[in-house]
Amino acid sequence: MFFRSRKEDKAAASGAPGQSASPGRATVSMAVNGKSVSAEIDARTLLVQLLREQLRLTGTHVGCDTSQCGACVVHVDGRAVKACTILAASCEGAKVTTIEGLAQGTELHPMQEAFRQHHGLQCGYCTPGMIMAAIDIVNRKGSTVSEAVIREELDGNICRCTGYHNIVAAVRAGAAAMGSMNRRQAAE
Amino acid sequence: MAATGIGAPVRRKEDQRFITGKGQYTDDINRPGQTYAVFVRSPHAHANIKRIDTSKLKGRDDIHVFTGEDIAKDKVGGLICGWMIHSKDGSPMKAGPHPALAQGKVRYVGDHVAVVIADTLAEARDAAELIAVEYEVLPASVDTATTQAAGKPQVHAEAPNNTVYQWHLGDKAAVDAAFASAKHVTKIDLVNNRLIPNAMEPRAAIGEFDAGNEAFTLYTTSQNPHVARLVLSAFIGIAPEHKLRVIAPDVGGGFGSKIFIYAEETVCVWAAKKVGRPVKWTADRTEAFLADAHGRDHVTHAELAMDAGGKILALRANTKANLGGYLSTFSSSVPTYLYAPLLSGQYDIPAIYCEVDAVYTNTAPVDAYRGAGRPEATFVVERLMEVAARQLGQDPAEFRRKNFITSFPHQTPVIMAYDAGDYAACLDKALEMADYKGIGARKAASQAKGLLRGLGFSAYIEACGIAPSAAVGSLGAGVGLWESAEVRVNPTGSIEVLTGSHSHGQGHETTFAQLVSQRLGVPIEQVTIVHGDTDKVQFGMGTYGSRSGAVGMSAIYYAIDKVIVKAKKVAGFVLEVPSETVDFNDGIFSSKATNKTLTFPEVALQAYIAHKFSGQQLEPGLKEGAFFDPTNFTFPSGVHICEVEIDPETGTTRIDRWTAVDDFGTLINPMIVEGQVHGGIAQGVGQALLEGAVYNAEGQLITASYMDYCMPRASDLPSFNVAMTSTPCPSNPLGIKGCGEAGAIAAPAAVINAITDALGHENIAMPATPLAVWKAAQASATKMAAE
C-alpha cells in the first residue's frame, strides 16, 4: 500500500483510476478533507476501512455490520453516506469529508459547537456520525427543520447514551447557526 | 469560581476531542507490527467438539491458530465469578468451569472455540473460514422458567438440574403470618425481559508483549482496568500484576457490559507472547450480540398483602434468574444482593421475603446491565403497587403516598438502611409537572379521536455508590468497593488528579475538575483528570453502580483535604506565621498574623523549590492521595410519570409526555445529570417497548443484529420533562447519591403501568410491541363488550 498525491499519480500514468493494480487489488484516488490521496487497496476494502486503517482518520467509527447505527457517516460529494456500506473503489474521484475535515482550523463547524453547547454527546462514539448526518439533514431540510422531522431523519443514527433529547436540541441549534452562517456568507 | 464550580452546568472538557474526531478508542489504536485476531465461535448452543481440523491452513506460516488445548497446555486459568453466593441450605453456589477457549464442549451460540491470528483482518477472517470444526450437537436448555425441570439437558455437570443456587432473603415466617391476616392480596406474574447492552463502541482489545522486559500491555474497552488487571493476574494467571499494564482509553459506553473480564482480552494478551507481536481484536456487532454479557432475564411471581385500608403488610417474591451458560464476573450478585434488598421500594413494608433460583441455560452469560437487579426489583414493586391500587379502587398516587417511608434513617426488613429522602416531595412535584389533574380530560380527548390514553407511575428507589467494603465482603464479594484518588499539584500550580474511576461517557474529566476548581480555587482549565491506565493510577475499582460521584469524588475530596493541610504548612513558612493561623479561601492563603497573602500557584511553587523550610521541618512537594470507603450505600429515588397514547387499531404506543423528578442529593453538574437521566429513561423505554433478546428452542439467538433487535431511535422517544429535588446523602462529604442508572430503573414500570392503564388490562409482557398491544387492546375491547 502506498500514498501519493494525485499529481504524482498522473505523472506516473499508472493506468486509469480504479483499474485493478493486480488481481484482487485496486488503485483508488479521491480527495479526503481537501487533500488528494491515492492508494492501492484490496478491492474489497470499504471506504471506512480506507479512512480508518490506511489514512488513519479514526474519527469515523464502526458500530454495526448492517448499515444501521450510522457511526460511520461521512459526506461523499456533499451527501451523507454510510462509509461501512460503500466500497472505497467506488469512491474514485469523489470528494470525501469526514468529521476531521469539518472545522476550519480552530474554528468549529456550527454543528460541532451546537453538540458541545447542548450536551449532545456522552461517550462520543456515535457523535461523528451524528454530526455528519445532522449537517446533511440541515442541507436537505433547511435551517428551521422541526423537532419531529429531526427525530424522523435521525432514524439511521443510533445513540445509546443520550436518549436523543440533547441531540435533537443540538441539531435544532446547529441548524439555526448554519442558517445564519449561510446568510452571512451570502451577504459577503 | 461559581461559573465552573459545584452546581454549574459546565460544558464538557472532553467534548473537544469527540466532536472533532480525535477521540482515542481502543480500535483507533494501532501498535507497530500488530496482528489481527478472529474468533471461531460455536454455531450450536450445546455441543461436544469432536475435532478441529486446520489442515487447509497447512504450510501457512503467517497464520496462527490456537484452541482450548493450547490454552490448557499453558495453564491459563478460567474466567471467574467474583461473588460467592450461598444457597439457603448453606451450600456454596455450584459453578462449572469457564475456560477462555472451549475445553471439548460449547455451551452457547458464540462460545469461543479457537482464535485465528493473521497479518490483516481480512486474512484472519478468510483463514477462520477454512477451519472445520466437527461438533456432536447436544440438545439445549434455553428457557429460564423450565431449565430446572427433570430431564432437561444439563449445562454443567457441577450444577445438577441447572441450578446454580437457591437463595433467599427475609423472614419467611413473619411474611406468611402477615399474608394470613391480610384483608387484600395482590398477585402478579412478571417476566423481566432479557436485554443486550449494545454500547455503541463494540468491545475490543490489543494484547502486547515486551520480551525485553517480560511485560504485557493490554488496551481494552473496560470500565475498570485495575479490576481487569487483578483478575488477569491473580486468577487467570496471564502475568504478574506488576508486569501487566492495562489501559482503558476512551471507551464508547459501557452500561455494565464492559465491567467484566471476557475470554477475548484474555486470549489477546496470552497470544501476544506466543505470536511475538501485538494481537488486536475488535468485535463486530453480531459478536457483541452473541458474546457480550446480557442483562435481566427474570421470571417472577410476587404478592403484596394489605390491610382493609390499603396499608401494606408484607411482600413476597419468587424469582428464577437466568445466568446463561457460564457465570460472568459479577453475575451471581445481580439477582441476589442487588435485587432483593430493593424490594421495599419507597414503602414502609414490615415484612419481606424473597427466594431466588439462579439457573444455567445454553445462552450467553447474563450479568450486570444498567441498574443491575434494581430495575428488576423496581419493576416487581411498582407493578404490584399499580395493580394493587387499581384492585382496591384507590388513586395510584395516593396509594403510594399512604405507604411511603416518611422518617429517616429507615431500616427495611431486607438489609438496607435508607439514610435520607423525601418521597412525597418528589411525588408532589411530579404530579404538578405532569398535570395529573388534567389526565381525565386528556383521556377523553384521546378517546374522541379513537385513541386510548394511559398514565403510569414509577416511584423507584435504588442503592448506589457501591459500596461499603466490609458490608459487601460479608455478603460474598471477592473485592472491596472503595475508590482511590491522587491529587498531584505541579510547581506551576496546575493539577493532575489520578482517579480509579473510569469515564466512558459520564463526563468525569469535567465534573471531577469542577470539584477541584471549587475547592482549590484554580481555573478548571488548570486541572486534568487522569484515568484508565494502571501504570498511572495506582489502583481503583472503576465505574459502575452509579458510584463515581459518591465514592470516586469522595476520594478526591479527601485527597484535596490533605493537599490543603500540606499547603497551609508551606504557606506558614513562606508567610513566616504559624501554620495553624493560615486560612485558605478561594485560592488565597492568608493569616491574621500578617497582611501578606499567597496564591495557590505561589504556594505550589514554594512547596517544590523548598527554599523556605528545611527537610527536617517539612517534606518538599505537594501530592496527596486518599482511599475512600463509604459507610453506607446511597439511596437515590424519584417519581417518573409516563403518559401514552395508543392506537387500538394498530397497537402503536406513542409516549406523549414523560415527567421525571429525581432526588440525587448534591448535583455537581446539572447538565450532565439531566443527560444521564435522559439516557437511562431511553434504555428503560427500550426495555418496555422495543428490546428483547430472543433465543429459539435450539438456542439460536434470533435477535443478533440491529435488523432484529430493536434499539430505541430518536423517533421512538419524546423530549423529557426532568426536574430534581434534593436531600443530600449523609454518608459522603459531598452529599452525592448517584444518577447513572435511575432512568433505566424507573422507566419500564412507568411505561407498562401507563399501557395497562390505557388498555384496562392488568398485565402485558415486555417488550410491549405493537402486536402485543394490539392483541391486548382487542381482548380488552371484547371483555368490555361482554361486560
Image (tube, grey):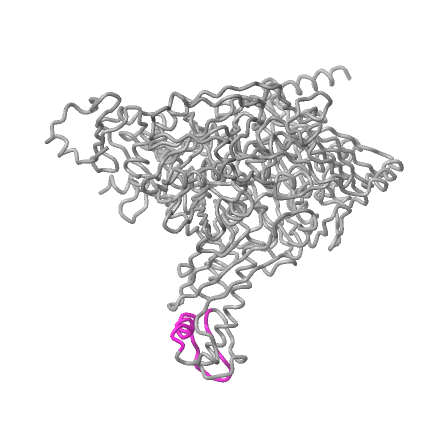
Q: Quadrant of the C terminus of chain B?
A: top right
- Magenta run includes residue B608: yes
- Residue visible at 50% across and 31% down in the picture: B69
User: Where is residue B463 drawn, in percent x and y?
Assistant: 65, 47
Residues B240 and A173: in front is B240
The answer to whether residue A149 is seen in the rendering is: no
- Magenta run includes residue B440: no
Magenta region? B587-610
Left or right of B202? Residue B407 is right
- Residue visible at 57% across and 30% down in the picture: B364
Answer with the quarter of the image where residue B277 lies. Answer: top left
Left or right of B140? Residue B594 is left
The answer to whether residue B254 is seen in the rendering is: yes
User: Where is residue B288 drawn, in percent x and y?
Assistant: 49, 31
Answer with the quarter of the image where residue A80 lies. Answer: top left
Q: Vertical placement of B544 versus B316: above or below? A: below
User: Where is residue B182 drawn, in percent x and y?
Assistant: 87, 36
Residues A135 and B335: in front is B335
Residues A53 and B311: in front is A53
Name the residue at the left extreme.
Answer: A11
